Image (tube, rainbow, N blue to C red):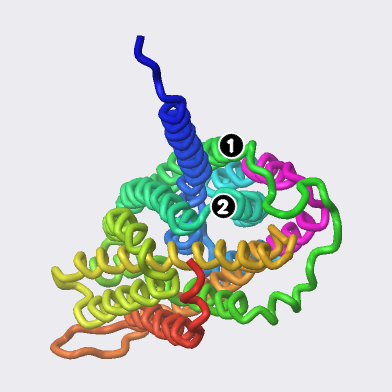
Amino acid sequence: MATVDPDILSSDSSVRQGREANGSVLGTQLGYSCANMGKSVVWTSFESIMLFYLVSIAGFGPLAAGALLAVTLLWDATFDLAVARWTDARGGSQGLARLVLFGAPLCGMGFWLIFVLQAPMAVAAAIVACRIGYSLCDVGHNTLLIRVAQRPGDAARVSGLRLLFSASGVALLALASGTSLSLADPQAQRQSLAMAAMGGGALYMGTLFVALWATRHLAPPSRAAGRTGTPKPLRDYARNPDFSRLLLVIAAQAAFVPLFQRALPFYGAAVRGDPGWAGPALLTVTLAQSLALPGWMAVARRWSSRHIAMVAHALALLAMTGLTLAPAERLDWAMLALLGAGLGGMNLAVWALLTATVRHAMAGGSQDEATPVGLFLAVLKSAAAAGNLLFAAIVALGPVSLGGSQGDSVTLLTLSATIVPILGSVLALALLRGRREFASLR
């Protein structure tokens, strides 16, 4: 009777256990990342169609609508930081889950009511409720990224998975908004958007609950899951050169680069004569981002996140330059695809840099898990609020003509939609080039 070498059995068992562990890790990462599908529907709605909806359908003035969106984003930013500080002070592995359990229904219901309610004050209240719920979930879900990306190389992979799910959510929004905004009657547009918002709110809640279930076994990476104490003073984060420079990069990226997406319905109406053009345009950007992300994830094995961010901003700069020089030519769809590829790379890189920076600080003895994420989100949303106010002011000025050759009139709105993102990418590139230490963070 033949005997079996016990070393072979041991080796087979180790391989099997390794495969099971890898499968478990991947399952956790996928379950966690799927929440970005629902989150992106809500976030991108505020970034791309909300100002148009409030001004053209809900009866708000441009400055009033812009101020409302900016104030709620600033409140969102302040709330993010306060909740993050409270979470670190309280400690405990279940604190992040409680934030999501409370915030997801509040955000999902508020999002639907924005498009259902008629009175402006009621719509404003629904926006506030939606943003409060979103903020609670944002701190809870984004801080879980630090727990999910525990191994070397995980930060870029999980960031890529999150963005792939985000792209699928944006694609759903693009299809729904393009169909709704193409309708001629404003009341029909409102009803169509309300039906889409009901599905979007349900998707938001469902995917976040899946993320909670997938990450239920993960413990905080700090010394003790149940510890309590005083979080590190905020000034200590300002003294960290890597982290402070990262905050400047995300401020430039969030304030100026997305202005083109915010302008899409207005841009479509001005350039194409159809605000519904925003749907196919947003879908093109999103599909390009989805197709480019696997490539960025593969490149991340060899390049630092800093270098990826620089190349991605260069692509976005090229795309916006092309749209500035030829806004209504056939080349615009290629430029939209190039913009999508750039957005995918810069977003993957900045979240990977955040994860690497936080884990590097924890390796050096820091126990703050939520505070750096809360600071990051606070800066991101404050910058987005500034960008919203800037664009609302441009819309409020109306169709200001800047002249043009051969009868083609260039307006302030259409020119700003591409020039401002160009300036944002130039600023981000200058910040990224100015800090070599980013190259060591993967």
What residue sits right under mark 1 in the picture? 209
Q: Residues within 10 Å of mark 1 (few under 14, many from 20)?
A: some
Left or right relative to 385: residue 418: left
Element under disc 1: helix
What residue sits right under mark 2 in the picture? 150
Circle nearer the viewer, 2 or 1: 2
Left or right relative to 436: residue 93: right
Residue 102 is inside the magenta segment: yes
Looking at the image, tell me whether mark 2 or mark 1 is earlier in sequence order: 2
What residue is rendered at 61% in x and 71% in y?
379
Q: Amino acid at mark 1?
A: Phe
Whole-angstrom CA distance, mark 2 to mark 1, is: 21 Å
Left or right relative to 52: residue 233: right
In the rendered image, residue 9, in percent from the top left (x then y), is placed at 44, 26
- Label tally: 2
What residue is rendered at 50% in x and 78% in y?
252
What residue is rendered at 25% in x and 64% in y?
337
